[in-house]
DNA sequence: CACTTGACCTGTCCGC
DNA sequence: TGCGGACAGGTCAAGT
């Protein structure tokens, strides 16, 4: 899924919807989706109040008044959808939507609040997870210790960006930008979009990318992610925001999933190839080896 | 050590 | 219409 802009969109939505709510119950289908539910839920989740909703890289954290947090990774197909008690409509109602259908067969975890509203964690492919972790211990998680800086932070500079790449240069620039320990939150969509923006072929070895190209890549990455947040993220397939609604960034994508269509910059037909084990979209005229 | 590949799952799409 | 295979927004462990 969900890359930085999508997770950030969910975070913003949930911040408006669940802060201050009190959890009254939790249900999950199998242990895989919520590994430590059986040991910690009764003590640290039930009767807890939501105090904040945070994001780091592609990980969401719902902080609780018990000093524990629900730590959530949506992986490829995860959704976090909030349904207000009064938001459901009868079958056939003009405003009928996903929220009426929940829970559905992809629902893995359901959290109910005191006012009757519910938060559903759905995940078709079951790669995602929810964990209940002491808030103070989150920074000690292996992923959190190795993850790189947030690319949209105001104090993150082009020089810092470039310096993250320079140590290990014998892999493709696409593999490097997807590496969460280099920069946080970049996934397949925004890797392709930003590399196109900077006119860099994704297979180029990182060591061959010039300072000027890194500077352009930095600017393009931030622009494309900020634009996507503005558009509510990319709904390539499953992604929806906290209210079950799709994002519209795909309407603005320049190369991602646009193979066979003209490059918006030069008109050359966009091609799809495989780089770093991932489907990769390029303009073969703008992005050369 | 740096880097790549396979595995985790379900659903959809495409060619035969 | 059915079936097999490839593929899908991410991350790890295991392999080279």
Image (cartoon, coloured by chain):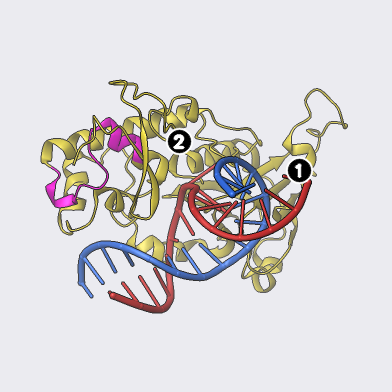
Chain colours: A yellow, B blue, C red
Circles 2 and 1: CB atoms closer than 8 Å: no
Helix, strand or loop at mark 2: loop
Using a 10 Å C-alpha cutoff, classify the residue at mark 2 as few (fewer than 14 neighbours), some (14 to 19) or many (20 or more).
some
Tell me residue A27's x, y (percent): 75, 60
Give left or right: position of A180 versus A50: left
Q: Earlier in the sequence, mark 2 or mark 1?
A: 1
Image mark 1: chain: A
Q: Which residue is mark 1?
A: A117
Q: Is residue A74 left or right of residue A279?
A: right
| Tag in front: 2 or 1 | 2
Does the rendering let one see residue A84?
A: no
Secondary structure under the numbered disc 1 in the rendered image: loop
Determine which quarter of the picture holds residue A193.
Answer: top left
Q: In the image, what residue occupies the spot 86% across and 28% down?
A: A92
Q: Quadrant of the C terminus of chain A?
A: top left
Q: Which residues are magenta?
A: A192-209
**Which residue is the site of mark 2?**
A257
| Circle 1 residues within 10 Å: few <14, some 14–19, many ≥20 | some
Coordinates of residue A221 in the picture (x, y in percent): 31, 36
In the image, residue A71 above or below residue A264: below
Residue at (67, 61) in percent of width and height: A45
Q: Chain of mark 2?
A: A
């Amino acid at each position: 899924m969900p890359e930085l802009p999508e997770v950030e969109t969910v975070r913003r939505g949930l911040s408006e919807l669940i802060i201050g709510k009190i959890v009254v119950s939790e249900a999950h289908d199998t242990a895989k989706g919520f590994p430590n539910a059986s040991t910690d839920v009764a003590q640290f989740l039930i009767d807890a109040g939501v105090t904040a909703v945070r994001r780091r890289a592609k990980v969401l954290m719902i902080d609780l008044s018990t000093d524990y947090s629900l730590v959530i990774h949506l992986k490829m197909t995860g959704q976090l959808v909030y349904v207000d008690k009064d938001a459901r409509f009868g079958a056939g109602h003009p405003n009928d939507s996903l929220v009426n259908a929940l829970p559905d067969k992809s629902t893995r975890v359901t959290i109910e609040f005191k006012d009757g509203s519910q938060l559903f964690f759905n995940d078709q492919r079951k790669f995602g997870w929810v964990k209940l972790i002491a808030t103070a211990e989150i920074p000690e998680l292996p992923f959190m210790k190795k993850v790189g800086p947030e690319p949209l932070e105001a104090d993150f500079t082009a020089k810092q960006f470039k310096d993250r790449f320079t140590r290990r240069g014998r892999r493709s620039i696409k593999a490097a930008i997807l590496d969460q320990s280099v920069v946080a939150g970049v996934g397949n969509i925004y890797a392709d979009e930003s590399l196109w923006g900077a006119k860099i072929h994704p297979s180029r070895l990182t060591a061959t990318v010039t300072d000027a190209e890194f500077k352009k890549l930095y600017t393009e990455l931030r622009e494309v992610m900020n634009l996507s947040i503005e558009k509510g993220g990319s709904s390539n397939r499953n992604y929806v925001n906290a209210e079950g609604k799709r994002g519209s960034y795909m309407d603005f994508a320049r190369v991602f999933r646009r193979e066979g269509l003209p490059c918006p910059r030069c008109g050359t037909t966009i091609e799809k190839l495989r780089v770093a084990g991932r489907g990769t979209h390029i303009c073969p005229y703008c992005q050369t080896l």
